[in-house]
């Protein structure tokens, strides 16, 4: 094997140079032999790396290469909140993330860091929920609108006022015995309908939210909320007026399906039907 001339006092074969490079040493020098201000450069371009002659190195990653770090685990911090790393696309399974949260603060932090679907790109903030824990009724809408996205609270604006009036009519309110949330935690652009893949990605957060909130009953408002919650493709008309249950945290929770307040604002004649649904919730 031909030696590669590097320095009069340093003679390395190509194999030795390859070894040194594997060890991360590109500028070999021996104290006393080579002045510090004249480092000996080993140009990789001049060295044919004899990888094939070093069989036990074959297949190893190049020096300096670091394999990607495994996803950082979510470490519970005080009060159960989570130190949440940025979560992206296919790397994340929202079900796994949601399952690791132990309280609503931790769940909120996990949702705020979520980038599991494209809705994260245009949101101003996530909209998680508002109200009391262990409520008489948990109201679940579809997705944040423009005002919700800006304020970070569900059911604000005209729809929110109508909902609050309806709840007040049965002696309920989000300051007393109600918790309100949406099936989707980020606003779809232009208030378009949420897509099935977005509903699926976000569903584990809703399911964990229900487990943590522990409502006595659920009022699902609108087709998308009802379909996501009940895992069905049924229409709102077919689901309304029926008796539904979901299992959450080992409990059976009754679910009433009704019209979304935004729909009632456009179709006031349906308020009578919505009132019947509210009576059903109250009777639960
Ligand atoms: S809508 Fe849900 S799944 Fe999609 S980015 Fe927001 S929190 Fe994550």
Image (spheres, rainbow, N blue to C red):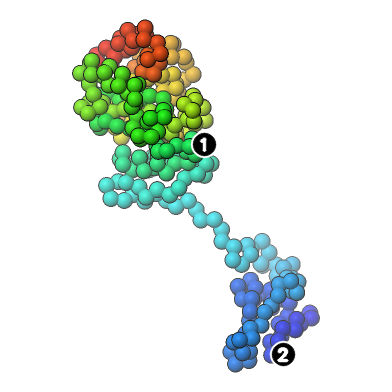
Residue 125 percent location from the top left of the image? 40, 38
Q: Is residue 196 above or below residue 17?
A: above
Quarter placement of the N terminus? bottom right
Q: Which residue is mark 1?
A: 118
Position of 237 relative to 193 (above/below)? above
Q: Furthest-bottom residue in view?
A: 32
Can residue 255 be seen here? The reply is: no
Q: Nearer the viewer, mark 1 or mark 2?
A: 1
Residue drawn at 33 percent across, 27 percent down: 156
Structural crowding at the residue carrying mark 2, measured as other residues with C-alpha within 10 Å and reported as few (<14), some (14–19) or many (≥20) = few
In 3D space, how far apart are the residues under numbered discs 1 and 2 (Cα atoms)?
61 Å
Q: Quadrant of ligand 1?
A: top left
- Res 237 → quadrant: top left
Residue at the spot of label 2: 8
**Is residue 58 in sight in this rendering?**
yes
Q: Earlier in the sequence, mark 1 or mark 2?
A: 2
Please state, as top left, top right, bottom left or bottom right, where the C terminus lies in the image. Answer: top left
- Residue 198 image offset from top left, x and y in percent: 49, 31
* Residue 246 position in % (x across, y down): 36, 23
Q: Quadrant of residue 68?
A: bottom right
């Amino acid at each position: 094997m031909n030696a590669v001339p590097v320095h009069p006092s340093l003679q390395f074969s190509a194999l030795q140079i390859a070894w040194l490079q594997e060890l991360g040493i590109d500028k070999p020098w021996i104290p006393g032999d080579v002045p510090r201000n004249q480092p000996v450069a080993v140009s990789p371009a001049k060295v044919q790396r004899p990888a094939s002659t070093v069989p036990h190195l074959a297949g190893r990653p190049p020096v300096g290469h670091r394999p990607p770090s495994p996803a950082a685990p979510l470490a519970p911090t005080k009060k159960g909140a989570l130190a949440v790393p940025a979560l992206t696309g296919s790397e994340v399974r929202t079900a796994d993330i949601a399952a690791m949260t132990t309280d609503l603060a931790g769940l909120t932090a996990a949702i705020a860091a979520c980038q599991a679907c494209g809705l994260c790109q245009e949101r101003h903030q996530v909209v998680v929920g508002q109200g009391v824990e262990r409520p008489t009724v948990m109201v679940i809408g579809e997705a944040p609108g423009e005002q919700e996205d800006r304020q970070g609270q569900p059911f604000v604006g005209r729809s929110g006022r109508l909902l609050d009036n309806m709840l007040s009519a049965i002696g309920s309110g989000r300051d007393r015995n109600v918790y309100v949330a949406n099936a989707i935690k980020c606003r779809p652009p232009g208030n378009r309908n949420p897509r099935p893949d977005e509903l699926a990605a976000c569903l584990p957060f809703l399911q964990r939210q229900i487990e943590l909130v522990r409502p006595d009953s659920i009022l699902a408002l609108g087709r998308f909320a009802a379909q996501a919650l009940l895992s069905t493709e049924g229409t709102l008309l077919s689901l309304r007026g029926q008796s539904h249950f979901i299992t959450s945290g080992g409990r059976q929770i009754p679910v009433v399906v009704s019209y979304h307040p935004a729909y009632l604002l456009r179709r006031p004649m349906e308020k009578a039907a919505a009132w019947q649904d509210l009576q059903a919730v109250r009777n639960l």
